[in-house]
Amino acid sequence: MLPRLAVLASGRGSNLQAVLDAIDRGRLAAEVVGVFSDRPQARALQRVHPSLRWSDDARTHARREDFDAALADAVASRQPDWVVCAGYLRILDDAFIARFRGRLLNIHPSLLPAYRGLRAHARAIEAGEREHGASIHFVSPELDAGAVVAQARVPLHAGDDAATLAARVLEVEHPLLVATLRLAVAGRIAERDDKALLDGHPLFTPLVLDSSGCLREHDP
Ligand code: GRF
């Protein structure tokens, strides 16, 4: 049986599409078993068969815990091996994270630990950074603070604004996500004691995406 992926997404879903394309092209041996959204209008939902869609408008729930419990039950019912937040724009509550901890990944558009939270691109520009990028990390209760597995870097250009930089980062997000999921579904990454492991050994620095779309260990 193929490894089962549940994907959480709030919007466009281009990262989800990259995963679906990689599966179609035989580059990722996995199956997307559900796409879950806090926004029923999310374009991401349209990218999969209706039988794989779950959504509920988070704003109609008075309490965060109620929405996240319903979401968690829906995700669990699909028996995923990995749960991937790919442009999921809500904070997950502690109960959700505890339920899927160790198989819960998020893609964040910054070189973590820099620029956790919102407006990562704009803040990197404001700070005059020369480099920016994206990170895939295990989700832990503190926002965007879980163990980082892999990163991809892009340069900042003079005249960049948040939109041009976001577009450049997105281009590397897609291969970064696919390459990381290849490791995940092969059972090569894990989380232990707040650290990411590769092949059972702690990663002291995140893996780096190279120009051929492969992940390699960081050169000191
Ligand atoms: C990506 O930039 C991702 O890093 C961020 O939200 C964006 C989602 O894009 N968390 P998409 O919905 O996958 O197109």
Image: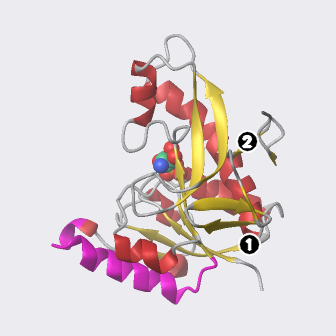
Which residue is located at x 43 percent, y 54 percent?
Answer: 11
Instruction: Indicate yes or no whether the magenta region holds residue 78.
Output: yes
* Image disc number at residue 125: none
Vertical side of 159 occupied by 135: above or below: below
| Quarter of the image where the N terminus is located | bottom right
Instruction: Indicate yes or no whether the magenta region holds residue 203.
Output: no
Task: Name the residue beneath numbered marker 2.
Answer: 208
Earlier sequence position, callout 2 versus callout 1: 1
Instruction: Look at label 1 and name its amino acid.
Output: Ala
- Spot occupied by residue 26 in the image (x, y as percentages of width and height): 84, 64
- Spot occupied by residue 186 in the image (x, y as percentages of width and height): 79, 70
**Side of 197 where 36 appears, left or right:** left
Q: Are marks 2 and 1 in contact (CB under 8 Å)?
A: no
Specify the segment rendered in magenta: 59-81
Task: Name the residue beneath numbered marker 1.
Answer: 30
Instruction: Look at label 2 and name its amino acid.
Output: Val
Which of the pair 61/101 is nearer the observer? 101
- Foreground mark, 2 or 1? 2
- Spot occupied by residue 64 in the image (x, y as percentages of width and height): 24, 70
Q: CA distance from mark 2 to mark 1?
A: 22 Å
> Where, by quadrant of the figure, is residue 91 drawn?
bottom left
Callout 2: helix, strand or loop?
Answer: strand
Vertical side of 23 occupied by 160: above or below: above
Which residue is located at x 34 percent, y 69 percent?
Answer: 93
Q: Main secondary structure of the magenta part?
A: helix
The local crowd at label 2, few if under 14, some if 14 to 19, many if 20 or more residues have their Cα within 10 Å, is many
| Quarter of the image where the C terminus is located | top right
The local crowd at label 1, few if under 14, some if 14 to 19, many if 20 or more residues have their Cα within 10 Å, is many
